[in-house]
Image (cartoon, helix red, strand yellow):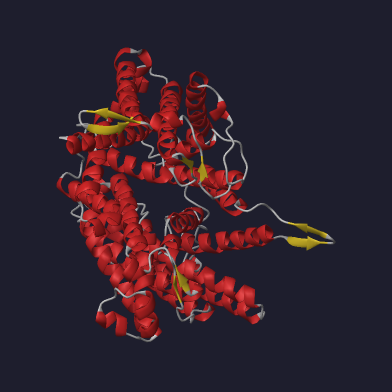
C-alpha cells in the first residue's frame, strides 16, 4: 500500500531517471571521441527538447498539434535576428527594425527571447484555436503552421524568404542541448504533476466528466500550450545554432512528422514515452541515413535508395499504431521501484 | 462587367476543386470519424499514375496516353483502388482506435506515399501536357475564360449531382447517410459496416482522382507537393462546413475558393504573396465566431 505523498514522490523520480540516462548517453557518446557521434548526440538531444515540449501540450491535453513546427520556426528566427552580426543583417535582412538590426545579444538570452516570442505567439494563436473541439483544433493548428510558413517564406526583407539565413553562431553542442533537454524534462514533469496538469489530464480522459467537475478546460489547455511553445521555440533556436543555416521549409511538414512519429512511437501518454520515442527513432534514423550514404564491402559500394528512411519510419509508425496504439511505453512512466517508497507489504509489479 | 464575371468563373472553378476534395474528406469523416491526412497524397498519386516512373526531367505519359474515354475511368479506378486498399490494409485494423490514433496513422500513410513517389519519380516538377487544347480561352459574358474552367465548373456540378443522387436514391447512399448520422445505430439496423466504409473510401479516392485530373490539366505539371495545399484547404473547408456535413463541406469549399480569388484580386500588390496567410487567418476568425462550423449537424456533438 502506498500513500498519496509516496505516489507524488515517486512521480518525481521520472525526470531524475530520464535526465540521468540522457547524461550517461551523452558522456558515452562524447567520451568515445567520434565527432560524428557527438553531433548525432547533440541532434538527438535537440529533438528530446522538441518532443518533450510537444508532449507538454499534446500528452497532457490529448489534442494533436500540427503547429509546433511553426513555434519552432518563430523561436529559431528570433534567436538568429538577435545574434547575427549587424553588418550581415544590413546585407541579408535589410527590412529588420532598427533595434533588431543593431542587436548583438549573447546566445543564452537570445534563446530565451526565441522561446518567449514563441510562447507569446502560442498564447495568441492558442486563444483562438483552443476554443475549437479536439479534432477541429488539430486541423486549425495545421492552418496555423501554413500561416507561419507562408509568412516566413515570403517576407524577403526580414526572413530572407526561401534563400536561407546563413552565418548563425554554431554554439550548440551535446552539452548545451543536454542542459536544455533536462530543463524541458523537469518543467514538463513539474507541469504534468501540478494542479493544472492533473486537471488537463482529466479532460484528456473524459472531456465531459472533467468539465462537469468544474474544470476550465480552455484555460488549462492554453496554459500548457504556452509552456509547450516556449520550449519548442527554444528547441528551434538550438536547431538553428546547431546547423548554422535557417530555411522556413526545414520547419514544415517533415519536422512535424518526425516529432509526432517520435511521440507516438514512444507513447503519447507519458513523459518517459516522449523521451524513449526520440531515442529509439533517432537511433533508427541514424542507422538508415548511414545505410543511405552506403558503405564499402570489399570492392562493392552498397547503399539503400534515398527516401528509404522516411518510408521505413512511416511504416514503423503505422505498425506500432496497429499493434500497440499507446506506444512502446504504453503510457506508463519510468519510476523508481515502488518498494523504495514503501513501509510495508510487497507491491505488485506494475 | 467583364472583370466581375471573370472573378466569378475563377472563383467557381477554384471553389469546385476545393469542394470535390472537401467532399472526399467529409465522406470518410462521416462514416468512420477519420480525418484522412493521406487524401492529398491520393491526389498526387493519381497525377503520377499518368506518367512512367523515372527520375527524368520530362514526363513520358503512361496512362496519360490513353484516349479520354479510357483514361478517365482508369484514373478514377486508380484513385478508388488506392483508397480502398489503404482502408483494407491499415484503417480496418484501427477501426476501434480513437480518432486521434487514426488521424496520425493517415498522416504516416501520406508521408509514406509521398516519399515512395519521391523515390520513384524524383523531386523535380515535370511538365505534362494532358489535353492542352482545353486551355484555349473562350469569350463568355465579356470575360475570356479558359475552356477548362467551364469544364471544371460543369464537371463539379455534374459530380455533385450524381453523388447526391447516389446518396439520396440508392441503398448504399441511404446506408452511408445513416452511418454518417449514427454509425452504431445504423449497424444495429442491419447496415454492413465493411460495405459502407469500403464504399465511402472508393468514392473518396475517385473524387481525389477527379481533382488530380483537373489540377494536372490546369497547371501542366506533375509535382510531388501538389496534393498537400489542396488537401489543407479541403480540410479547412470540412471544419468550416461543420465536421461530417456533406453539403457543408461543398458550400465551404466554394466559399474558400471565392475568398481566395477575391483576396488575390483586391489585396495590395506587396501583400499578395501572403494571400494564404490572410485566407487562413480569416478561417480562424470565422471559427472563433462559429466554433461548430457554419453548417453543423445537430447530432455532431457526442451525447452523454
Give the image quarter of residue A251: bottom left
Q: Residue A225 or B79: which is nearer the viewer? A: B79
Q: Residue at x 33, y 35 (%)?
A: B22
Q: Is residue A261 visible?
A: yes
Vertical position of residue B53 compared to residue A128: above or below: above
Q: Residue at x 27, y 48 (%)?
A: A207
Quarter the C terminus of chain B occupies:
top left
Percent x, y of residue A280: 57, 60
Q: Is residue B303 visible?
A: no
Give the image quarter of residue B101: top left
Q: Residue at x 33, y 40 (%)?
A: B234
Q: Is residue A333 left or right of residue B278?
A: right
Percent x, y of residue B149: 32, 31
Percent x, y of residue A16: 46, 74
Q: Residue furthest right?
A: A298
Quarter the N terminus of chain B occupies:
top left
Q: Residue B47 or B299: which is nearer the viewer? A: B47
Percent x, y of residue A12: 41, 71
Q: Is residue B151 left or right of residue B291?
A: right
Amino acid at each position: 500500500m502506498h500513500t498519496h505523498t509516496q505516489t507524488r514522490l515517486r512521480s518525481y523520480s521520472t525526470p531524475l531517471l530520464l535526465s540521468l540516462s540522457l547524461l550517461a548517453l551523452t558522456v558515452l557518446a562524447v567520451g568515445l571521441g567520434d565527432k560524428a557521434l557527438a553531433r548525432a548526440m547533440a541532434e538527438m538531444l535537440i529533438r528530446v527538447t522538441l518532443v518533450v515540449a510537444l508532449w507538454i501540450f499534446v500528452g497532457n491535453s490529448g489534442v494533436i498539434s500540427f503547429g509546433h513546427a511553426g513555434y519552432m520556426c518563430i523561436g529559431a528566427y528570433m534567436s538568429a535576428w538577435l545574434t547575427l552580426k549587424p553588418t550581415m543583417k544590413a546585407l541579408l535582412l535589410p527590412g529588420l527594425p532598427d533595434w533588431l538590426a543593431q542587436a548583438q545579444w549573447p546566445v543564452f538570452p537570445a534563446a530565451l527571447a526565441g522561446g518567449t516570442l514563441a510562447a507569446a505567439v502560442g498564447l495568441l494563436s492558442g486563444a483562438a484555436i483552443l476554443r475549437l473541439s479536439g479534432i477541429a483544433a488539430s486541423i486549425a493548428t495545421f492552418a496555423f503552421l501554413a500561416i507561419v510558413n507562408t509568412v516566413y517564406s515570403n517576407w524577403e526583407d526580414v526572413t530572407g524568404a526561401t534563400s536561407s539565413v546563413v552565418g548563425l553562431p554554431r554554439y550548440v553542442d551535446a552539452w548545451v542541448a543536454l542542459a536544455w533537454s533536462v530543463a524541458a524534462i523537469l518543467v514538463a514533469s513539474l507541469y504534468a504533476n501540478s494542479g493544472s496538469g492533473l486537471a488537463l489530464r482529466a479532460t484528456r480522459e473524459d472531456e465531459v466528466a472533467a468539465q462537469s467537475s468544474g474544470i476550465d478546460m480552455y484555460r488549462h489547455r492554453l496554459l500548457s500550450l504556452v509552456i509547450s511553445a516556449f520550449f519548442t521555440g527554444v528547441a528551434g533556436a538550438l536547431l538553428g545554432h546547431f546547423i548554422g543555416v535557417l530555411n522556413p521549409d526545414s520547419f514544415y511538414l517533415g519536422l512535424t512528422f518526425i516529432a509526432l512519429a517520435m511521440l507516438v512511437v514512444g507513447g503519447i501518454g507519458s513523459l518517459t514515452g516522449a523521451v524513449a520515442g526520440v531515442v529509439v527513432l533517432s537511433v533508427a534514423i541514424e542507422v538508415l541515413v548511414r545505410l543511405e550514404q552506403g558503405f564499402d564491402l570489399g570492392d562493392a559500394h552498397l547503399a539503400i535508395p534515398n527516401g528509404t528512411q522516411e518510408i521505413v519510419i512511416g511504416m514503423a509508425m503505422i505498425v506500432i499504431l496497429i499493434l500497440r496504439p499507446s506506444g512502446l511505453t504504453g503510457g506508463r512512466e519510468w519510476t523508481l521501484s515502488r518498494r523504495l517508497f514503501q513501509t510495508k507489504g510487497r507491491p505488485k509489479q506494475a | 462587367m467583364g472583370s466581375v464575371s471573370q472573378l466569378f468563373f475563377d472563383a467557381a472553378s477554384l471553389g469546385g476543386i476545393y469542394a470535390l476534395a472537401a467532399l472526399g474528406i467529409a465522406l470518410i469523416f462521416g462514416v468512420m470519424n477519420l480525418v484522412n491526412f493521406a487524401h492529398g497524397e491520393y491526389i498526387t498519386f493519381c497525377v503520377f499514375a499518368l506518367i512512367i516512373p523515372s527520375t527524368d526531367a520530362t514526363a513520358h505519359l503512361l496512362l496519360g496516353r490513353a484516349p479520354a474515354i479510357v483514361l478517365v475511368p482508369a484514373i478514377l479506378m486508380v484513385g478508388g483502388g488506392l483508397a480502398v486498399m489503404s482502408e483494407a490494409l491499415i484503417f480496418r485494423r484501427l477501426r476501434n482506435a480513437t480518432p486521434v490514433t487514426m488521424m496520425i496513422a493517415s498522416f504516416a500513410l501520406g508521408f509514406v506515399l509521398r516519399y515512395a513517389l519521391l523515390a520513384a519519380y524524383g523531386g523535380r516538377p515535370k511538365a505534362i501536357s494532358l489535353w492542352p487544347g482545353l486551355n484555349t480561352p473562350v469569350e463568355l459574358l465579356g470575360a475570356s475564360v479558359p475552356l477548362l474552367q467551364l469544364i471544371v465548373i460543369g464537371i463539379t456540378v455534374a459530380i455533385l449531382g450524381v453523388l447526391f443522387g447516389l446518396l439520396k436514391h440508392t441503398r448504399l447512399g441511404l446506408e452511408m447517410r445513416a452511418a454518417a448520422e449514427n454509425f452504431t445505430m445504423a449497424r444495429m439496423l442491419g447496415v454492413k459496416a465493411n460495405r459502407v466504409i469500403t464504399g465511402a473510401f472508393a468514392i473518396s479516392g475517385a473524387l481525389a482522382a477527379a481533382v488530380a485530373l483537373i489540377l494536372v490539366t490546369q497547371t501542366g505539371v506533375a509535382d510531388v507537393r501538389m496534393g498537400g495545399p489542396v488537401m489543407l484547404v479541403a480540410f479547412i473547408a470540412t471544419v468550416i462546413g461543420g465536421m461530417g456535413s456533406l453539403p457543408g463541406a461543398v458550400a465551404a469549399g466554394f466559399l474558400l475558393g471565392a475568398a481566395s480569388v477575391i483576396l488575390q484580386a483586391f489585396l495590395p500588390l506587396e501583400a499578395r504573396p501572403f494571400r494564404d496567410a490572410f485566407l487562413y487567418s480569416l478561417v480562424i476568425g470565422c471559427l472563433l465566431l462559429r466554433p461548430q462550423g457554419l453548417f453543423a449537424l445537430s447530432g455532431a456533438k457526442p451525447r452523454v
